[in-house]
Every structure is written in C-alpha cells, then in structure tokens.
Image: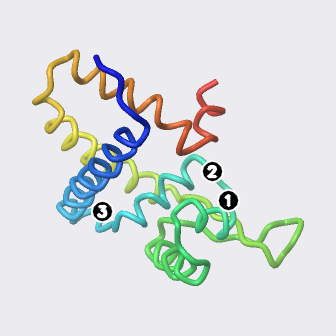
C-alpha cells in the first residue's frame, strides 16, 4: 500500500465520518421503540461508561452547551432513562447515571444499530473488515484519549 499524506488522511476522515454518522442517524430513526436522537444515544453511551458524570462532562463529550445539555438530560430524566442526583460533596453539582430502563433502551438501540452497520459491512471481504477494524482501533485513542486508558 502506498504512503498517504497527512492531508489526504485528514480529507478521507472528513469525507467518510459524516457518511457513517448519517447511516447511524438513519438507523436510529428507524428504531421507533427507542425513539432516541443521536445526541441522546451518545449521552446514554457516555453515561454507561462514565456513571456519575457531571452535566458539564457530558456536555463536553457530546459537544453541546450546558443549557442545551440540560434540556437533553431533562428529557431523558422525564422518560426514566437517566437519574439525576446531587453530588454528596457539593450539593450544587449534579451527577448523572443510567436507570435500569436506560440501560435496557441503550442496549436495544445499540444492538439494532450495530446489526444494521454489520449488514452494511458485510459487503466487504473479511480482510477489508479487518483493515477497517484496525484503522478504527488506531483512530480511537487519537480522538478519545480516555479510550486508550480503558483498553489497557
């Protein structure tokens, strides 16, 4: 395989990631039982990995302002998917965790979305799928430094 410049690598990421996210969003829209937006889905995933996170930690991860994140989390709390509690050491700080229902909804949405993505990836050969998996494994710690810590 020939060498690819940094600029070409960056262009390929910029060109491809939005297409992947469009497919994920489309599949999530088909999951009417879960009825989750992509930011809600990502919030549930984050809270599943980071139970007890603060609103600002979730907002930073999702890329929303605190007021927007507060509205999004408020909707998840109303639906019984997320529990909001005061932090013991500082009553002004709020911690967020998934409820049992939130865990179930997340698992169902994630399984359905993963199955749809697997169906799309079935068009690739086993070697091509291994290449995609390897590339994503290389990208993850670059874009999510905490991912490298979790894997070790």
Q: Is residue 24 left or right of residue 67?
A: left
Q: Quadrant of the N terminus?
A: top left
Q: CA distance from mark 2 to mark 3?
A: 21 Å
Of residue 89 and residue 56, the one placed in the foreground of this image is 56
Disc tally is: 3
N-term-proximal mark, 2 vs 3 = 3
Label of residue 152 in the image: none
- Verify CB contact (< 8 Å) between mark 1 and mark 2: yes
Q: Which residue is mark 1?
A: 53
Q: Residue at x 27, y 51 (%)?
A: 15
Q: Residue at x 57, y 46 (%)?
A: 49
Q: Quadrant of residue 133?
A: top left
- Secondary structure of the residue carrying tag 1 is strand
Farthest residue, direction left: 123
Q: Which residue is mark 2?
A: 50
Q: Residue at x 50, y 55 (%)?
A: 100
Q: Which residue is mark 3?
A: 34
Q: Quadrant of residue 142?
A: top right
């Amino acid at each position: 395989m020939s060498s690819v410049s940094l600029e070409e690598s960056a262009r390929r990421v910029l060109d491809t990631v939005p297409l992947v996210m469009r497919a994920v969003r489309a599949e999530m829209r088909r999951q009417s039982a879960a009825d989750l937006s992509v930011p809600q889905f990502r919030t549930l995933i984050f809270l599943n990995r980071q139970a007890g996170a603060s609103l600002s930690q979730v907002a930073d991860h999702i890329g929303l302002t605190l007021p927007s994140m507060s509205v999004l989390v408020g909707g998840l709390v109303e639906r019984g998917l997320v529990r909001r509690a005061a932090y013991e050491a500082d009553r002004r700080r709020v911690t967020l965790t998934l409820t049992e229902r939130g865990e179930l909804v997340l698992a169902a949405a994630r399984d359905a979305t993963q199955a749809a993505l697997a169906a799309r990836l079935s068009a690739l050969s086993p070697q091509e799928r291994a290449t995609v998996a390897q590339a994503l494994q290389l990208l993850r710690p670059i874009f999510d430094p905490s991912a490298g810590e979790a894997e070790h």
